Amino acid sequence: MAMSSNILAPGKVPPEFLINLLARYTGGDSSVIVRPGIGVDAAAIEMGEQVLVAKTDPITFATDQIGWYAVHVNANDVACLGARPRWFLATILLPERGTTRALVEQIFAQLEAACTSLGVALIGGHTEVTIGLERPIVVGQMLGTVAREALISPQAGRPRDRVIMVKGFPIEGTALIAREKAANLLARGYSPALIERARQMLFDPGLSVVRAAEIAARAARLHGLHDPTEGGVATGLWELARAAGLGIRVEQAALPLLDLGAQLCAEFGLDPLGTIASGALLIAVAPGDEARVLTALDEAGIAAATVAVLTDDSDEAVLVTAAGERPLPRFDADEITRLF
């Protein structure tokens, strides 16, 4: 029996549906200078010479180190508008079965450790045991500030801009597989050392792109930043172009696919291009500033490579492969959902 078109699959709400909802139900305040949209990581509110940048994002896949995930994915989105993350709130929803005081304190300790690593203050939220949940969920809210002239608009991309990718992919997906499916991997013959190496990718190279965003913004005037999360780097690249009303051509050979990530994705039949990819950062920059940004990142010990170019055809989304060109895939449901 075919599934009704009214029933949504796990993962992000389909973009076309979301665009319609945002057009109908948001807006109306002139102080909001970056409004919600596809590829827009956070909201920006003008407050005199300073801009308040606000973001909320949940952690729904991970259970291990859920507090660490929650802080960093929200901080990344604030940094993508050029702001410094400063204040964090968390809504912690816990399953009615199996929640202990030790579990709650563990999540709080993870939140505090992640906030400390970024110089962020944990300032409040809400915590409850919730009927109907099978696993903990943490919904984070990050606030940050940036000078008005330093705000990075997600709509500022221009045709011929180069797109640089920082670090590699899928960092979050690799760590998530190892942390949530460790017993399964052991049963399949993977060594404890390899599983531990994948688990530690949560910290090295890590989920945070805050430092990389700051370094890139000091090197040149950026035309956009975006961190690919659900839907993987393929969807993130499409979102970056969509936010600016542009098209994109992506060089598959240039994409920095991590060997361990490719291996674990293949083990579970996941496409790395569509696997949750926090830890990577996409940077849109004018052609004349490309080398300057790459040099600054390299001098800071941060791997980066140019992977795509923005085009003036808003309908263009192309993946250039050794076998020729094909449409850039878009993953409305992240590949990682197939593990759960």
Image (cartoon, helix red, strand yellow):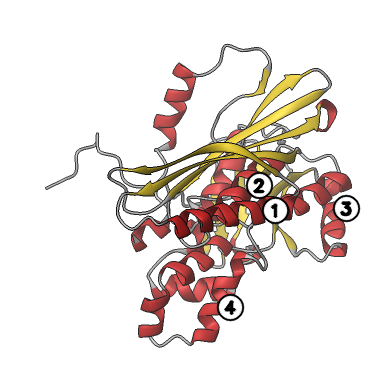
Distance CA(mark 4)–CA(mark 3):
32 Å
- The type of residue carrying mark 3 is Arg
Image disc number at residue 197:
4
Q: Which numbered disc flags the more N-terminal residue, 2 or 3?
A: 2
Report which residue position mark 1 lands on. Answer: 209
Quarter of image, res 150: top right
Q: Which numbered disc flags the more N-terminal residue, 1 or 3?
A: 1
Q: Are the two marked residues, 4 and 2, in contact with CB atoms closer than 8 angstroms?
A: no
Report which residue position mark 3 lands on. Answer: 292
Res 327 visible: no
The image shows residue 271 at horizontal and vertical percentages of 44, 63
- Please identify the residue farthest to the front as the structure is shown: 101
Report which residue position mark 2 lands on. Answer: 76
Res 242 visible: yes
- The type of residue carrying mark 4 is Arg
Circle 4: is it few (<14), some (14-19), or many (20+) Cα within 10 Å? some
The image shows residue 332 at horizontal and vertical percentages of 41, 46
Circle 3: is it few (<14), some (14-19), or many (20+) Cα within 10 Å? some
Q: Nearer the viewer, mark 4 or mark 3?
A: 4
Q: Nearer the viewer, mark 2 or mark 3?
A: 2
Q: Secondary structure at mark 4?
A: helix
Q: Are the two marked residues, 1 and 2, in contact with CB atoms closer than 8 angstroms?
A: yes
